[in-house]
Amino acid sequence: MAIARVVTFDDVDASRMTDLQQRMEQGDRPDGMPPVEVIVLHDTDERRAMVVQLFANEDDYRRGEAIFAAMPADDTPGRRAAVSRYAVAARMQG
């Protein structure tokens, strides 16, 4: 079963989001990161962002969680406000 790590950020400005988007498009991944799908949502008016990271299984989640949690603040889109874990109950694409 897939597992989602959902992180919310405050104080997110457009330039940080542009930088994040460019790094993601270039395939810039932290060393040791297991396969992960990342969805980034940004509310420009409220200066908030939500990042959903989807992992295939528990082992990948644990490895990815440790890597993301250790990231310096300069590598995140803003101030980390909350981190939650969810089982992916249903998923549809296309």
Image (cartoon, grey):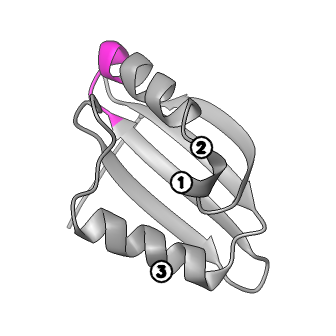
Q: Residues within 10 Å of mark 2 (few under 14, many from 20)?
A: few
Residue type at mark 1 is Asp
- Percent across and percent down for residue 31 are 29, 35
Residue type at mark 2 is Pro
Mark-to-mark CA distance, 1 and 3: 12 Å
Residue 13 horizontal side relative to residue 21, left or right: right
Q: Residues within 10 Å of mark 1 (few under 14, many from 20)?
A: few
Residue type at mark 3 is Thr
Q: Which residue was labeled with disc 2? A: 72
**Location of residue 81 with respect to 77 vertically, above or below:** above
Residue at x 48%, y 63% (from the top left corner):
40
Read off the magenta span: 55-60
Q: Nearer the viewer, residue 54 or 33?
A: 33
Mark-to-mark CA distance, 2 and 1: 6 Å
Residue at x 70%, y 71% (from the top left corner):
12
Q: Which residue was labeled with disc 1? A: 75
| Numbered disc 2: secondary structure | loop
| Disc number placed over residue 18 in the picture, else none | 3
Marks 2 & 1, CB-CB < 8 Å contact? yes
Q: Is residue 47 magenta?
A: no
Residue 82 horizontal side relative to residue 4, left or right: right
- Percent across and percent down for residue 68 are 50, 36
**Location of residue 67 with respect to 20 vertically, above or below:** above
Image quadrant in which the N terminus is located: top left
Residue at x 24%, y 60% (from the top left corner):
93
Residue 78 horizontal side relative to residue 27, left or right: right
Mark-to-mark CA distance, 3 and 2: 18 Å
Q: Quadrant of residue 15?
A: bottom right
Residue 35 horizontal side relative to residue 80, left or right: left
Residue at x 54%, y 31% (from the top left corner):
86
Q: Nearer the viewer, residue 17 or 42?
A: 17
